[in-house]
Amino acid sequence: MENREAPLRAACPPGTPDGSISNFEIKVFDGCANPYLGLAAIIAAGIDGLRKHSTLPEPIDDNPDNVKDKVQRLPKSLSESVEALEKDDVLKDLIGEKLLVAITGVRKVLTRILLPTVHVIRNQ
């Protein structure tokens, strides 16, 4: 069984030899995300893993809801994402502190000014 809900998945389409990986599916960010920042985060995580000689965790072939106690939850809101980004030294080392401050500053303004407007519009 393949876990199609995994945030990062090595996909082997039908017809590929066993063990051959032809593409990766990345599902941790959507069309609203900055694709450059998302890809930079993935590259930074990969570089960090190589530097630390990290090993991959065991694959999870179950419904993610059944194993939510065993895995780290991703941020559920923009404000949670900003908090996580500010704490991420790996990404800060890759993109630099000045760019990280600019990105988090813009996101904080969006959270403070625009999100309350969205909630008002939705509740009308």
Image: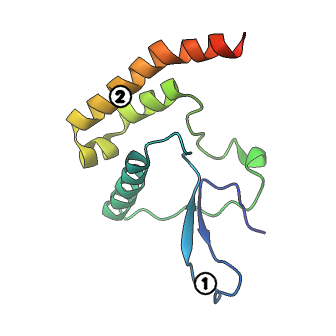
Vertical side of 102 occupied by 16: above or below: below
Looking at the image, residue 36 lies above or below residue 57: above
Q: Residue at x 31, y 40 (%)?
A: 89
Which amino acid, mark 2?
A: Thr
Q: What residue is shown at x 61% (from left), y 63% (from top)?
A: 58
Q: Name the residue under label 1.
A: 19
Q: In this view, does 110 lie to the left or right of 75?
A: left
- Where disc 2 sits, the SS reads helix
Q: Position of residue 50 (x, y in %)?
A: 35, 64
Does 99 sit above or below residue 26?
Answer: above
Residue mark closest to the camera, 1 vs 2: 2
- Quarter of the N terminus within the rendering: bottom right
Three-letter code, disc 1:
Gly
Measuring from the top left, give residue 21's x and y in whole percent. 56, 78
Q: Distance between the residues labelled 1 and 2?
A: 40 Å
36 or 97: which is nearer to us? 36
Circle 2 is placed at which residue position? 104
**Secondary structure under badge 1?**
loop
Whole-percent x, y for residue 23 in the image? 55, 72
Relative to 20, 100 lies left or right: left
Within 10 angstroms of label 2, few (less than 14), some, or many (20 or more) residues? some
Q: In which quarter of the image is the C terminus?
A: top right
- Nearer-N-terminus badge (1/2): 1
Quarter assignment of residue 59: bottom right
Specify the quadrant of the image occupied by residue 116: top right
Residue at 57 percent of width and 39 percent of height: 74
Return the residue found at the far bottom. Answer: 17
